[in-house]
Image (cartoon, rainbow, N blue to C red):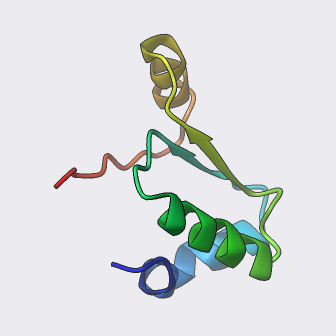
Amino acid sequence: DSPLKLFQKTAPLLLALIYSDVKLILVGRINNSKYVIQLEELISSFGLNDKVIITGEVNRSEYVDYLVNSFCFIVGKTN
């Protein structure tokens, strides 16, 4: 899906981000730099720069820390 379709599908999450102290942390490598730029532009356009964090690739220890300290996590499938 394109970044726009992804955001449209996750509208309830967007509302939670906008109206609460929830943060969305996207952890892991994204190989498509154009996709990252589009995603960052959408995050900015929704005014969510302080609520959505894109970490990029992290080491295993950091990854485990994110998992252990999260309320909820989703693991994406690679193609």
Q: Residue at x 36, y 50 (%)?
A: 74
Residue 19, can we see it? Answer: no
Q: Within the image, what quadrant is residue 62 found in?
A: top right
Q: Position of residue 44 (x, y in %)?
A: 78, 73
Q: Is residue 41 left or right of residue 2?
A: right
| Number of numbered discs on residues | 0
Quarter of the image that includes the C terminus: bottom left
Q: Residue at x 66, y 71 (%)?
A: 16
Rendered view: 5 above or below 13: below
Q: Position of residue 76 (x, y in %)?
A: 30, 51
Q: Residue at x 42, y 15 (%)?
A: 60
The residue furthest top is 61
Q: Within the image, what quadrant is residue 29 found in?
A: top left
Q: Position of residue 47 (x, y in %)?
A: 83, 75
Q: Is residue 14 left or right of residue 78?
A: right
The residue furthest left is 79
Residue 38, can we see it? Answer: yes
Rendered view: 47 above or below 72: below
Q: Is residue 50 left or right of residue 33?
A: right
Q: Is residue 65 left or right of residue 32?
A: right
Rendered view: 60 above or below 48: above
Q: Residue at x 50, y 85 (%)?
A: 4
Quarter of the image that includes the N terminus: bottom left
